[in-house]
Amino acid sequence: MPDMEIEPPQDLVVTTQHGCEIARAVRIVDSKPAGLKGESDPFIVEILRPVNEDDRNKILELKAKEREAFLQARDKIQHHQLSMKLLKAEYLYDYSRLILYFKSENKVDFRDLLKSLASQFKTRIELRQIGVRDETRLLGGIGCCGKAVCCAQFMNTFYPVSTKMAKEQNLSLNPAKLSGICGRLLCCLAHEHEYYASFHGKFPKLNAEIVVGSETARVMDINYITSKILLSFADRRKVHYSLDQVSGRKDQATGRNLWWISLPGEGEPDLSILLKNLNPPGSGKKKKKSDSPARNENAGHNDGRRRDEPRSRPEEPAAQNDQNDPDDDDHADGQDED
């Protein structure tokens, strides 16, 4: 790298592993980035110079040629009847390569298309198939927060995101609210997960019971950013308290976490009400009918029969049924006559 002073943010002409490109210096760092494998094999091979006026004019010309190449390549795709959607055409700074980004749900055989494009543009053609996340990073957009999407602004790679992260942040598991413009879970869930995970176990969960003086309340909301907890009382009062007032301990007998609000001038309140609510009178499991004494007594009066012996029908009721059902005999006689 030649001796030059770089003042971020500044556009530079650099040589990368792909060729000559335009890059922007964001900030000066003292240590090697985590994604860099080694000093001998960096992605940016050399910084040539800062962007000058001639370079800016060439960049404008480059953008115009990219738009023209995009339209021509899209027409070629339609001519070959390929099931692929062209997203962007990108020239390297020295026109040594034309990169065409596309997406497709199926595998595409674009060998004939590649030959046709190479003969038309007279340069090396590279077709890159990307997914929905890469599409958003490539094209950019505005997220639900009103700012540019993270993947297009500063992210170098995608991190795994799960709904568990949303649960730990007390977010509603509504796919419409948790999904970005790419249709996948928001990347910011992973960015903020470590912060919210640091509070795990230190505060009660939503809908948990908590003692405030001589009353009990339920946790309606916890805002870790404002350090506030919202409680709802039995008389429908809703009161905010500071998270610094929340105290708790684990009951050794039940293993349950007991929470209370520390009020000025008061110590630990009577937490027995929480244990009563945990096992209120009459809330025990009902006994099964097979375990009731009455059923066991009835089971003992089986006239000396074994438990596995089938019960026979009484003879007298059976004889009465035969005498009182003449229709059955007539029906049987009719079948014999047929």
Image (cartoon, rainbow, N blue to C red):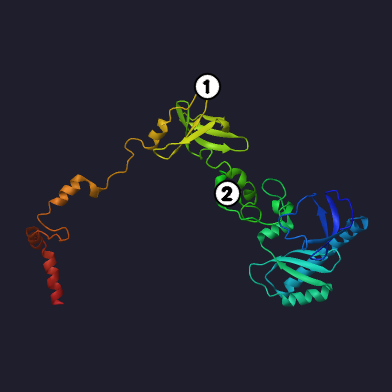
User: Looking at the rendered structure, which numbered label has been put on residue 195?
Assistant: none
Question: Could you tell whether 237 is left or right of 225 in the image?
Answer: left
Secondary element at tag 1: loop
Q: Characterize the local packing of mark 1: few (<14), some (14-19) or many (20 or more) Cα atoms within 10 angstroms.
A: few
Viewer-side residue, 205 vs 142: 205
Choose top left, top right, bottom left or bottom right for residue 16.
Answer: bottom right
Question: Could you tell whether 34 is left or right of 164 in the image?
Answer: right
Secondary element at tag 2: helix
Q: Residue furthest right?
A: 54
Please state which of the two labelled residues, at mark 1 or mark 2, is closer to the viewer. Answer: 1
Q: In which quadrant is the N terminus drawn?
A: bottom right
Residue type highlighted by circle 1: Gly
Q: Is residue 81 above or below residue 32?
A: below
Q: Which residue, given by chain and number where applicable, does mark 1 sit on?
A: 265
Choose top left, top right, bottom left or bottom right for residue 314.
Answer: bottom left
Res. 172 visible in picture? no
